[in-house]
Image: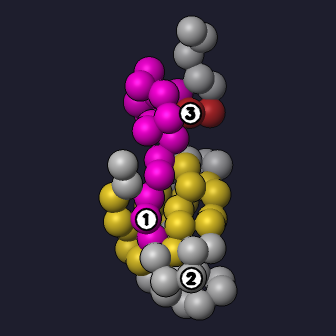
Amino acid sequence: MSEQIKAGQKVGPGKYVCIDCGKTIEMTEAEQDLRKCPACSCEMYDCFPITHIREDVKTPEDAMHPPKR
């Protein structure tokens, strides 16, 4: 499941897919500003945060140092 995020927002780790051209931007650090798409200048992305991958990852710190299973 994804949610839509607009460029200019502070985002955490995850994949952000441009809704116009499909270009994927991967963010690896927390609290980064999401920029307009470098390919088409679109401002909207489908967001696939890392928290959707593992239920035990709840914070950006968890994403950088995932809890052991």
Nearer the observer, 53 or 5? 53
Image x and y of residue 31, in percent: 50, 54
Q: Secondary structure at mark 2?
A: loop
Give the CA distance from mark 1 to mark 3: 19 Å
Give the CA distance from mark 2 to mark 3: 27 Å
Q: Secondary structure at mark 3?
A: helix
Nearer the observer, 45 or 60? 45
Image x and y of residue 42, in percent: 49, 86
Mark found first going from the N terminus, 1 or 3: 1
Which residue is disc 1 drawn over?
46
Q: Residue at x 59, y 90 (%)?
A: 40
| Residue 48 covered by magenta stretch | yes
Q: Residues within 10 Å of mark 2 (few under 14, many from 20)?
A: few
- Inspect this view and state whether residue 54 appears: yes
- The stretch of residues the image draws in magenta is 45-62
In the displayed structure, does residue 10 sit left or right of residue 17?
Answer: left
Give the CA distance from mark 2 to mark 1: 11 Å
Q: What amino acid is labelled 1 in the image?
A: Asp
Q: Is residue 14 above or below residue 32?
A: above
Q: Are marks 1 and 3 in contact (CB under 8 Å)?
A: no
Q: What amino acid is labelled 2 in the image?
A: Cys
Q: Residue at x 37, y 54 (%)?
A: 2
In the displayed structure, does residue 49 sit left or right of residue 13?
Answer: left
Image x and y of residue 28, in percent: 64, 49
Which residue is disc 3 drawn over?
63
Which residue is disc 2 drawn over?
21
Q: What amino acid is labelled 3 in the image?
A: Ala
Q: Are marks 2 and 1 in contact (CB under 8 Å)?
A: no
Q: Secondary structure at mark 1?
A: strand
Question: Nearer the observer, disc 2 or disc 3?
Answer: 2
Image x and y of residue 6, in percent: 38, 74
